[in-house]
């Protein structure tokens, strides 16, 4: 399998020589990659390796300083219009869920479709209920986030992102803040989403998930992509010393 | 001491005093509404990307918080006509109360806005909402909830500051009582009663704020 950075008809995301600094600190070094429509990518690497920063650049939560990012053909410049367009197509799930505490589960899901897409209340509610059903949490629609467990909150966060009908989903360590017994329900939801053909980039240390779902695992260290391969190859035959060391640390604990 | 208490003038003046209470209450409520508008608008400017707006708000807050309210109210009362705006004492007092309360509210509400985690804002932005929408639909309510106790005590203070509006003879409790006192010379009786009335008004305000808070901020938090 080759990963060409040339524009292809089914390319969903392209990063071309992307660089990012925080002041004098260079957080991303010359990142080039592309993600095909429907492809599932798992991004892993030690903390501080820039994997979260990378996906946060894709929806401009972090501005990059050099290089080009394209999502579904839209060039992510620094002008508001492109940023809006891309954010409507890219959903994001956060480590800390970030549900809105003053809104019910249902209202959390309805807010953006109504305000950003201009859906009517009825249409937004229909859509929200459908997606809450899909993440198997429809019966909690009237509750507030603080009344739910971590796993339930994260599933609501996934449904909330899906309510925008995004073409891409970004997951930023979605299970890292969860108690162990709740990890599975969230991963199952993500696996379901993957099976339905969603384009996904997941920053995660859940290597079981990577084996089962990923088309490609990308390993990052110190702000650069060290290596990338399909999971079978990545886990059985890592080429770089850095990767071997990392895998040794997370797989044998 | 053989001072004879005589509440007759107070009792005779009771209808006027109660109207005065109503005046104080209305002055306070209108002042607060204006203060809330100035407070929220001020926070938006104070935290905006435009440097001039931020500095204008810093200047405004410093000016209001470091000058006496009595002087502010005189200034408005005598300066506005020079600018061609001739207002009655009561509307002038409302504007003065709104501006004064607003300046304090800006700093209080700003504290609330800063207490909202960055993740909330990012979640809103990632969902495709604009900054203004994020502020209005995501940040504002939890921010107000966080600082509501401080805002309540600031607004009780504003309620009591309405008495200073008697200096420009706005219609409120203190000016009514001054009139009764100057006609009857029953200073102690009048101000004893008025003190009790202010206590009741303050208590009523706190109850109203408590009621509002328990309705509007009813959502549970961890």
Image (cartoon, coloured by chain):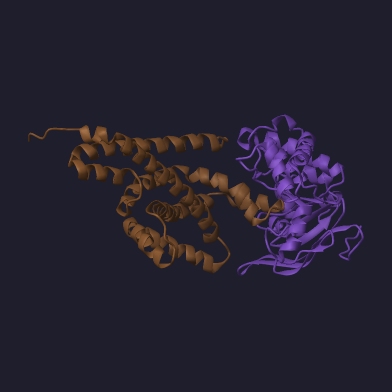
Q: Residue furthest left?
A: B1
Using the rendered image of the protein, determine whether residue A239 is visible from the camera's viewpoint: no
Q: Identify the residue shown where x is 74% and y is 46%.
A: A113
Q: Is residue A128 left or right of residue A7?
A: left
Using the rendered image of the protein, determine whether residue A160 is visible from the camera's viewpoint: yes
Of the chain colours in the picture, the one used for chain A is purple
Q: Quadrant of residue A9?
A: bottom right
Above or below: residue A134 compared with residue A74: above
Q: How many marks?
A: 0
Above or below: residue A110 compared with residue B169: above
In the image, residue A218 lies at what x, y percent? 79, 55
Q: Nearer the viewer, residue A46 or B27?
A: B27
In the image, residue B138 lies at what x, y percent? 62, 47
Q: Residue furthest top?
A: A139
Q: Quadrant of the N terminus of chain A?
A: bottom right
Q: Nearer the viewer, residue A41 or B23?
A: B23
Q: Identify the residue shown where x is 24% and y is 42%.
A: B180
Q: Is residue B131 left or right of residue B188?
A: right
Q: Is residue B43 left or right of residue B74?
A: right
In the image, residue A26 lies at what x, y percent? 66, 67
Q: Identify the residue shown where x is 43% and y is 55%.
A: B95
Q: Nearer the viewer, residue B76 or A55?
A: B76
In brown, which chain? Answer: B
Q: Quadrant of the C terminus of chain A?
A: top right
In the image, residue B59 lies at what x, y percent? 44, 65
Above or below: residue B127 compared with residue A188: below
């Amino acid at each position: 399998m080759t990963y060409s950075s040339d524009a292809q008809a089914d390319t969903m995301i392209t990063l071309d020589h992307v660089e990012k600094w925080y002041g004098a600190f260079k957080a991303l070094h010359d990142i080039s990659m592309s993600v095909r429509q429907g492809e599932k990518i798992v991004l892993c690497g030690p903390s501080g390796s820039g994997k979260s920063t990378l996906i946060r650049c894709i929806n401009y939560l972090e501005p990059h300083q050099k290089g080009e990012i394209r999502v579904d053909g839209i060039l992510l410049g620094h002008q508001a219009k492109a940023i809006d367009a891309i954010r409507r197509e890219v959903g994001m799930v956060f480590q800390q869920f970030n549900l809105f505490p003053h809104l019910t589960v249902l209202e959390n899901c309805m807010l953006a479709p109504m305000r950003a897409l201009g859906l009517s209340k009825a249409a937004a509610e229909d859509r929200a209920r459908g997606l809450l059903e899909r993440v198997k949490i429809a019966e909690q629609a009237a509750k507030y986030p603080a009344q739910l467990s971590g796993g339930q909150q994260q599933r609501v966060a996934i449904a909330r992102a899906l309510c925008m009908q995004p073409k891409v989903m970004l997951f930023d360590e979605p299970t890292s803040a969860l108690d162990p017994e709740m990890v599975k329900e969230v991963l199952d939801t993500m696996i379901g989403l993957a099976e339905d053909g969603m384009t996904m980039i997941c920053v995660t240390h859940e290597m079981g998930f990577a084996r089962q779902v990923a088309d490609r695992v990308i390993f990052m260290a110190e702000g650069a992509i060290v290596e990338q391969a399909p999971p079978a190859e990545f886990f059985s035959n890592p080429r770089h010393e850095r990767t071997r060391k990392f895998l040794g640390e997370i797989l044998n604990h | 001491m053989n001072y004879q208490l005589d509440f007759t003038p107070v009792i005779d003046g009771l209808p006027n005093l109660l109207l005065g209470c109503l005046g104080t209450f209305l002055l306070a409520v209108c002042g607060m509404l204006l203060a809330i508008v100035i407070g929220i608008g001020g926070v938006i400017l104070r935290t905006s990307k435009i440097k001039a707006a931020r500095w204008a708000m810093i200047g405004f807050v410093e000016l209001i918080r470091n000058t006496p309210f009595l002087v502010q109210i005189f200034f408005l009362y005598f300066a506005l006509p020079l600018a061609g705006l001739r207002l009655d004492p009561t509307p002038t007092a409302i504007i003065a109360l709104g501006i004064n309360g607003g300046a304090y509210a800006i700093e209080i509400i700003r504290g609330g806005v800063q207490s909202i985690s960055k993740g909330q804002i990012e979640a809103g932005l990632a969902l495709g909402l604009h900054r203004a929408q994020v502020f209005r639909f995501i940040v504002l309510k939890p921010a107000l909830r966080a600082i509501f106790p401080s805002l309540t005590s600031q607004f009780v203070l504003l309620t009591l500051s309405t008495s200073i509006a008697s200096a420009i003879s706005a219609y409120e409790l203190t000016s009514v009582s001054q009139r009764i006192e100057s006609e009857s010379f029953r200073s102690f009786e009048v101000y004893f009663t008025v003190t009790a009335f202010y206590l009741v008004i303050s208590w009523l305000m706190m109850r109203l704020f408590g009621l509002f808070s328990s309705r509007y901020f009813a959502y549970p938090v961890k």
